[in-house]
Image (tube, helix red, strand yellow):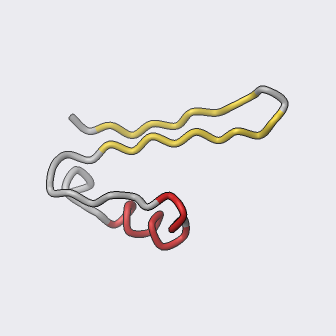
Amino acid sequence: MLFHSTELLQLLSSHLPQYELQFSSSDRTLKLQRNAGHGSYVPCCYDNY
């Protein structure tokens, strides 16, 4: 079940170590924002409450 899985977090941590992503046993929330310059951004959120 994705709610309890840490696979996505582990994958992101291995490819983006500079962000020092935190693991915990509680609910997972992932928020990303891509800034492409020129004042634009694309937010991406995954919340599982």
Q: How many marks?
A: 0
Please state the horizontal and vertical placement of residue 29, each as a whole percent of the image: 32, 43
Please state the horizontal and vertical placement of residue 42, each as a whole percent of the image: 64, 33
- Judging depth in this view, the residue of 4 and 31 nearest the camera is 31
As drawn, the residue found furthest toward the left would be 25
Seen at 22% across and 50% down, the residue is 3
Q: Is residue 19 left or right of residue 8?
A: right
As drawn, the residue found furthest toward the top would be 39
Seen at 65% across and 41% down, the residue is 34
As drawn, the residue found furthest toward the right would be 38
Choose top left, top right, bottom left or bottom right for residue 11.
Answer: bottom left
The vertical placement of 19 against 31, above or below, is below
Seen at 45% across and 40% down, the residue is 31
Seen at 78% across and 26% down, the residue is 39
The quarter of the rendered structure image containing the C terminus is top left
The vertical placement of 14 against 36, above or below, is below
- Judging depth in this view, the residue of 36 and 44 nearest the camera is 36
The vertical placement of 40 against 27, above or below, is above
Please state the horizontal and vertical placement of residue 40, each as a whole percent of the image: 75, 28
Please state the horizontal and vertical placement of residue 6, each as a whole percent of the image: 28, 63
Q: Is residue 35 left or right of residue 21?
A: right
The quarter of the rendered structure image containing the N terminus is bottom left
Choose top left, top right, bottom left or bottom right for residue 21.
Answer: bottom left
